[in-house]
Image (spheres, rainbow, N blue to C red):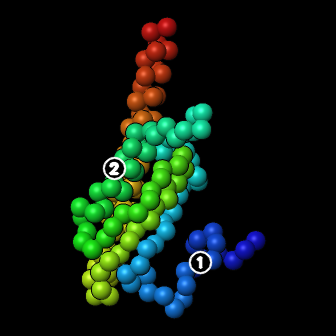
Amino acid sequence: MAEKFQNKYRIPSARLQNWDYRWAAAYFITICTKDRVHYFGQIENGKMILSNVGILADVFWHEIKNHTKNIELGEFVVMPNHIHGVLILNADENDTAIVSNNVSNNVSNNVSNNVSNNVSNNVSNNVSNNVSNNVSN
């Protein structure tokens, strides 16, 4: 089995060692769901149908520009178990450190909290509805 990066991640880091990712540039980002569960929706007839969680992921991506400065949003797509997007940092080295940290923290926290809350609510509602339906039948 391949060695885990920092004894935690499934693959070694693909980051370029001499690159400072706070620098102004375009960055391709992929965020996957835990265990690759299809929280964001499903593909039907070749078209992505977003779940409530997928809609939130889409909304939060587009909100990034309202919470940081010197950033542009490039292409973005929500898939059943991951998202892809391009973030373009346009600031100088001093500003991008702040932008980079804010974007990373905001995206990670918003997606994580809302996925967790929506999964919990959906499971709870589905269990409640199924129990109610089964009792009344």
Instruction: State the SS at label 2.
Output: helix
Crowding near the residue tagged with mark 1, few <14, some 14–19, many ≥20 C-alpha atoms within 10 Å: few
User: Which residue in the protein does label 2 denote?
Assistant: 59
Q: In this view, does 81 lie to the left or right of 72?
A: right
Query: Which label belongs to residue 105?
Result: none
Q: Is residue 67 visible?
A: yes
User: Which residue in the protein does label 1 denote?
Assistant: 14
18 up-or-down from 103: above or below = below
Toward the viewer: 14 or 119? 14
Are the residues flagged by discs 1 and 2 in contact, CB closer than 8 Å?
Answer: no
Q: Extreme bottom residue here?
A: 18
The quarter holding residue 63 reads bottom left
Q: Where is residue 43 in the image (x, y as percent from the top left)?
A: 57, 39
User: Label 1 amino acid?
Assistant: Ala
Mark closest to the chain's N terminus, 1 or 2: 1
User: Label 2 amino acid?
Assistant: Val
Q: In this view, does 13 lie to the left or right of 107?
A: right
Q: In this view, does 85 lie to the left or right of 42?
A: left
Q: Measuring 48% from the left and 66% from the top, which residue is drawn there? A: 29
Instruction: State the SS at label 1.
Output: loop
Q: Where is residue 23 in the image (x, y as percent from the top left)?
A: 39, 84
